[in-house]
Image (cartoon, grey):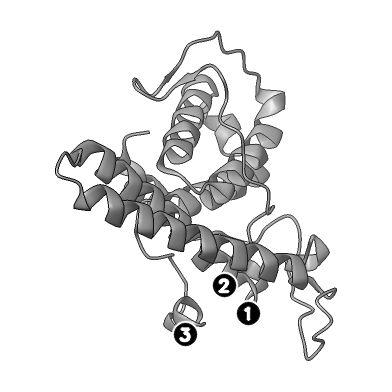
C-alpha cells in the first residue's frame, strides 16, 4: 500500500477502530499484583508493563546506535534514515502499550512481534511467491493482518504488512471486503500502520499519549 494513501483509506473506513467483535473492557483497577487482565482478558497488566519496559530499553539502545552512526565521518544517510524509521515504529508501539494500560480499547491484539514472511522482498516491497486467496479466508486473514500491523516495531515490518494488505484487497471482491468483522480488523490494522509511520494515534487522548 502506498504510504501516501494510507490516511485516505483509514478515513474512508471510519477513521478509528469501531466496536470490535471481542468486547475489550478493562478490568484494571487498584490491583498492583500484575496479574489483572486488560483488553477484555486477552492480555495481563504485568505482561504489558514488562513489554513496555523492554521497548523503552530497546529504544534507548536504538537512539544510541543512531547517534553513533551519525557521528561517523562515513555516515550513510540511507542507513541513518532506516534506523530513524525503525525508531519511529518502535516508539509508536511503546506508546500503544502505554495507552493500553489506561484504555483497554487501545491494546494491541497480541504482544508478539510478527516474523516477516521469507518470500517478502524488502527492496522491492513485493512478494516473490505465488499467492492464493479465497473469500472464506478473508475474515481470518484480516484478523492476522491487524495482529501483525499492531505488532510491528520496524519499518520493514510496516512495509511487509502494507504489501500483504494490498494483495489481499486486490484479490478479494469489494462485497466480501465489506464483511463487518473483516472490515473492523482492517481498520485496526490501518490505524496501527498509521502510527508506525510517525503519525499520532487517531482518537488517542493527549493524556494517554503523554502518560509516563
Quarter the N terminus occupies: top left
Q: Which of marks 1 and 2 is in front?
A: 2
Q: How crowded is mark 2: few (under 14 residues within 10 Å), some or many (20 or more)?
A: many
Where does residue 173 sit, x and y in percent of width and height?
Answer: 53, 24
The residue that disc 1 covers is 102
Nearer to me, 204 or 83? 83
Q: Do the residues labelled 1 and 2 touch (CB within 8 Å)?
A: yes
In the rendered image, the vertical position of residue 212 relative to residue 122, given as above or below? below
Where does residue 63 sit, x and y in percent of width and height?
Answer: 37, 59
Q: Which residue is drawn at 46% across and 23% down?
A: 170
The residue that disc 2 covers is 98
Q: Which residue is drawn at 65% across and 19% down?
A: 134
Disc ID at residue 73: none
Viewer can see residue 57: yes
The residue that disc 3 covers is 207
Q: Is mark 1 on a helix, strand or loop?
A: loop
Where does residue 86 sit, x and y in percent of width and height?
Answer: 40, 48
Q: How far apart are marks 1 and 2 (CA)?
A: 7 Å
**Furthest-bottom residue in this view:** 30
Left of 91 or right of it: where is 7?
left
Left of 96 or right of it: where is 197?
left
Q: Which of marks 3 and 2 is in front?
A: 2
Total residue callouts? 3
Nearer to me, 97 or 140? 97
Where does residue 32 sit, x and y in percent of width and height?
Answer: 80, 86
In the rendered image, the vertical position of residue 30 relative to residue 124, given as above or below? below
Q: Which of marks 2 and 3 precedes in the sequence? A: 2
Q: Which residue is drawn at 20% across and 38% down?
A: 76
Amino acid at each position: 500500500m502506498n504510504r501516501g494513501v494510507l490516511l485516505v483509506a483509514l478515513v474512508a473506513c471510519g477513521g478509528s477502530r469501531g466496536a470490535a467483535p471481542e468486547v475489550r473492557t478493562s478490568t484494571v483497577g487498584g490491583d498492583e499484583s500484575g496479574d489483572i487482565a486488560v483488553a477484555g482478558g486477552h492480555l495481563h497488566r504485568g505482561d504489558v508493563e514488562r513489554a513496555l519496559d523492554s521497548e523503552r530499553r530497546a529504544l534507548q539502545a536504538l537512539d544510541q546506535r543512531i547517534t553513533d552512526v551519525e557521528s561517523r565521518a562515513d555516515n550513510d544517510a540511507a542507513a541513518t534514515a532506516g534506523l530513524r524509521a525503525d525508531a519511529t515504529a518502535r516508539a509508536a508501539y511503546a506508546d500503544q502499550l502505554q495507552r493500553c494500560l489506561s484504555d483497554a480499547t487501545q491494546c494491541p491484539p497480541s504482544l508478539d512481534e510478527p516474523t516477516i514472511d521469507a518470500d517478502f522482498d524488502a527492496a522491492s516491497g513485493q512478494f516473490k511467491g505465488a499467492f492464493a486467496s479465497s473469500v472464506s479466508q478473508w475474515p481470518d486473514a484480516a484478523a492476522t493482518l491487524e495482529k501483525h500491523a499492531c505488532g510491528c516495531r520496524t519499518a520493514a515490518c510496516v512495509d511487509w504488512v502494507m504489501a500483504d494488505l494490498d494483495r489481499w484487497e486486490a484479490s478479494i471482491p469489494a462485497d466480501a471486503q465489506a464483511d463487518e468483522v473483516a472490515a473492523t480488523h482492517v481498520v485496526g490494522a490501518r490505524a496501527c500502520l498509521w502510527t508506525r509511520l510517525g503519525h499520532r494515534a487517531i482518537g488517542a487522548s493527549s493524556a494517554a499519549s503523554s502518560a509516563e
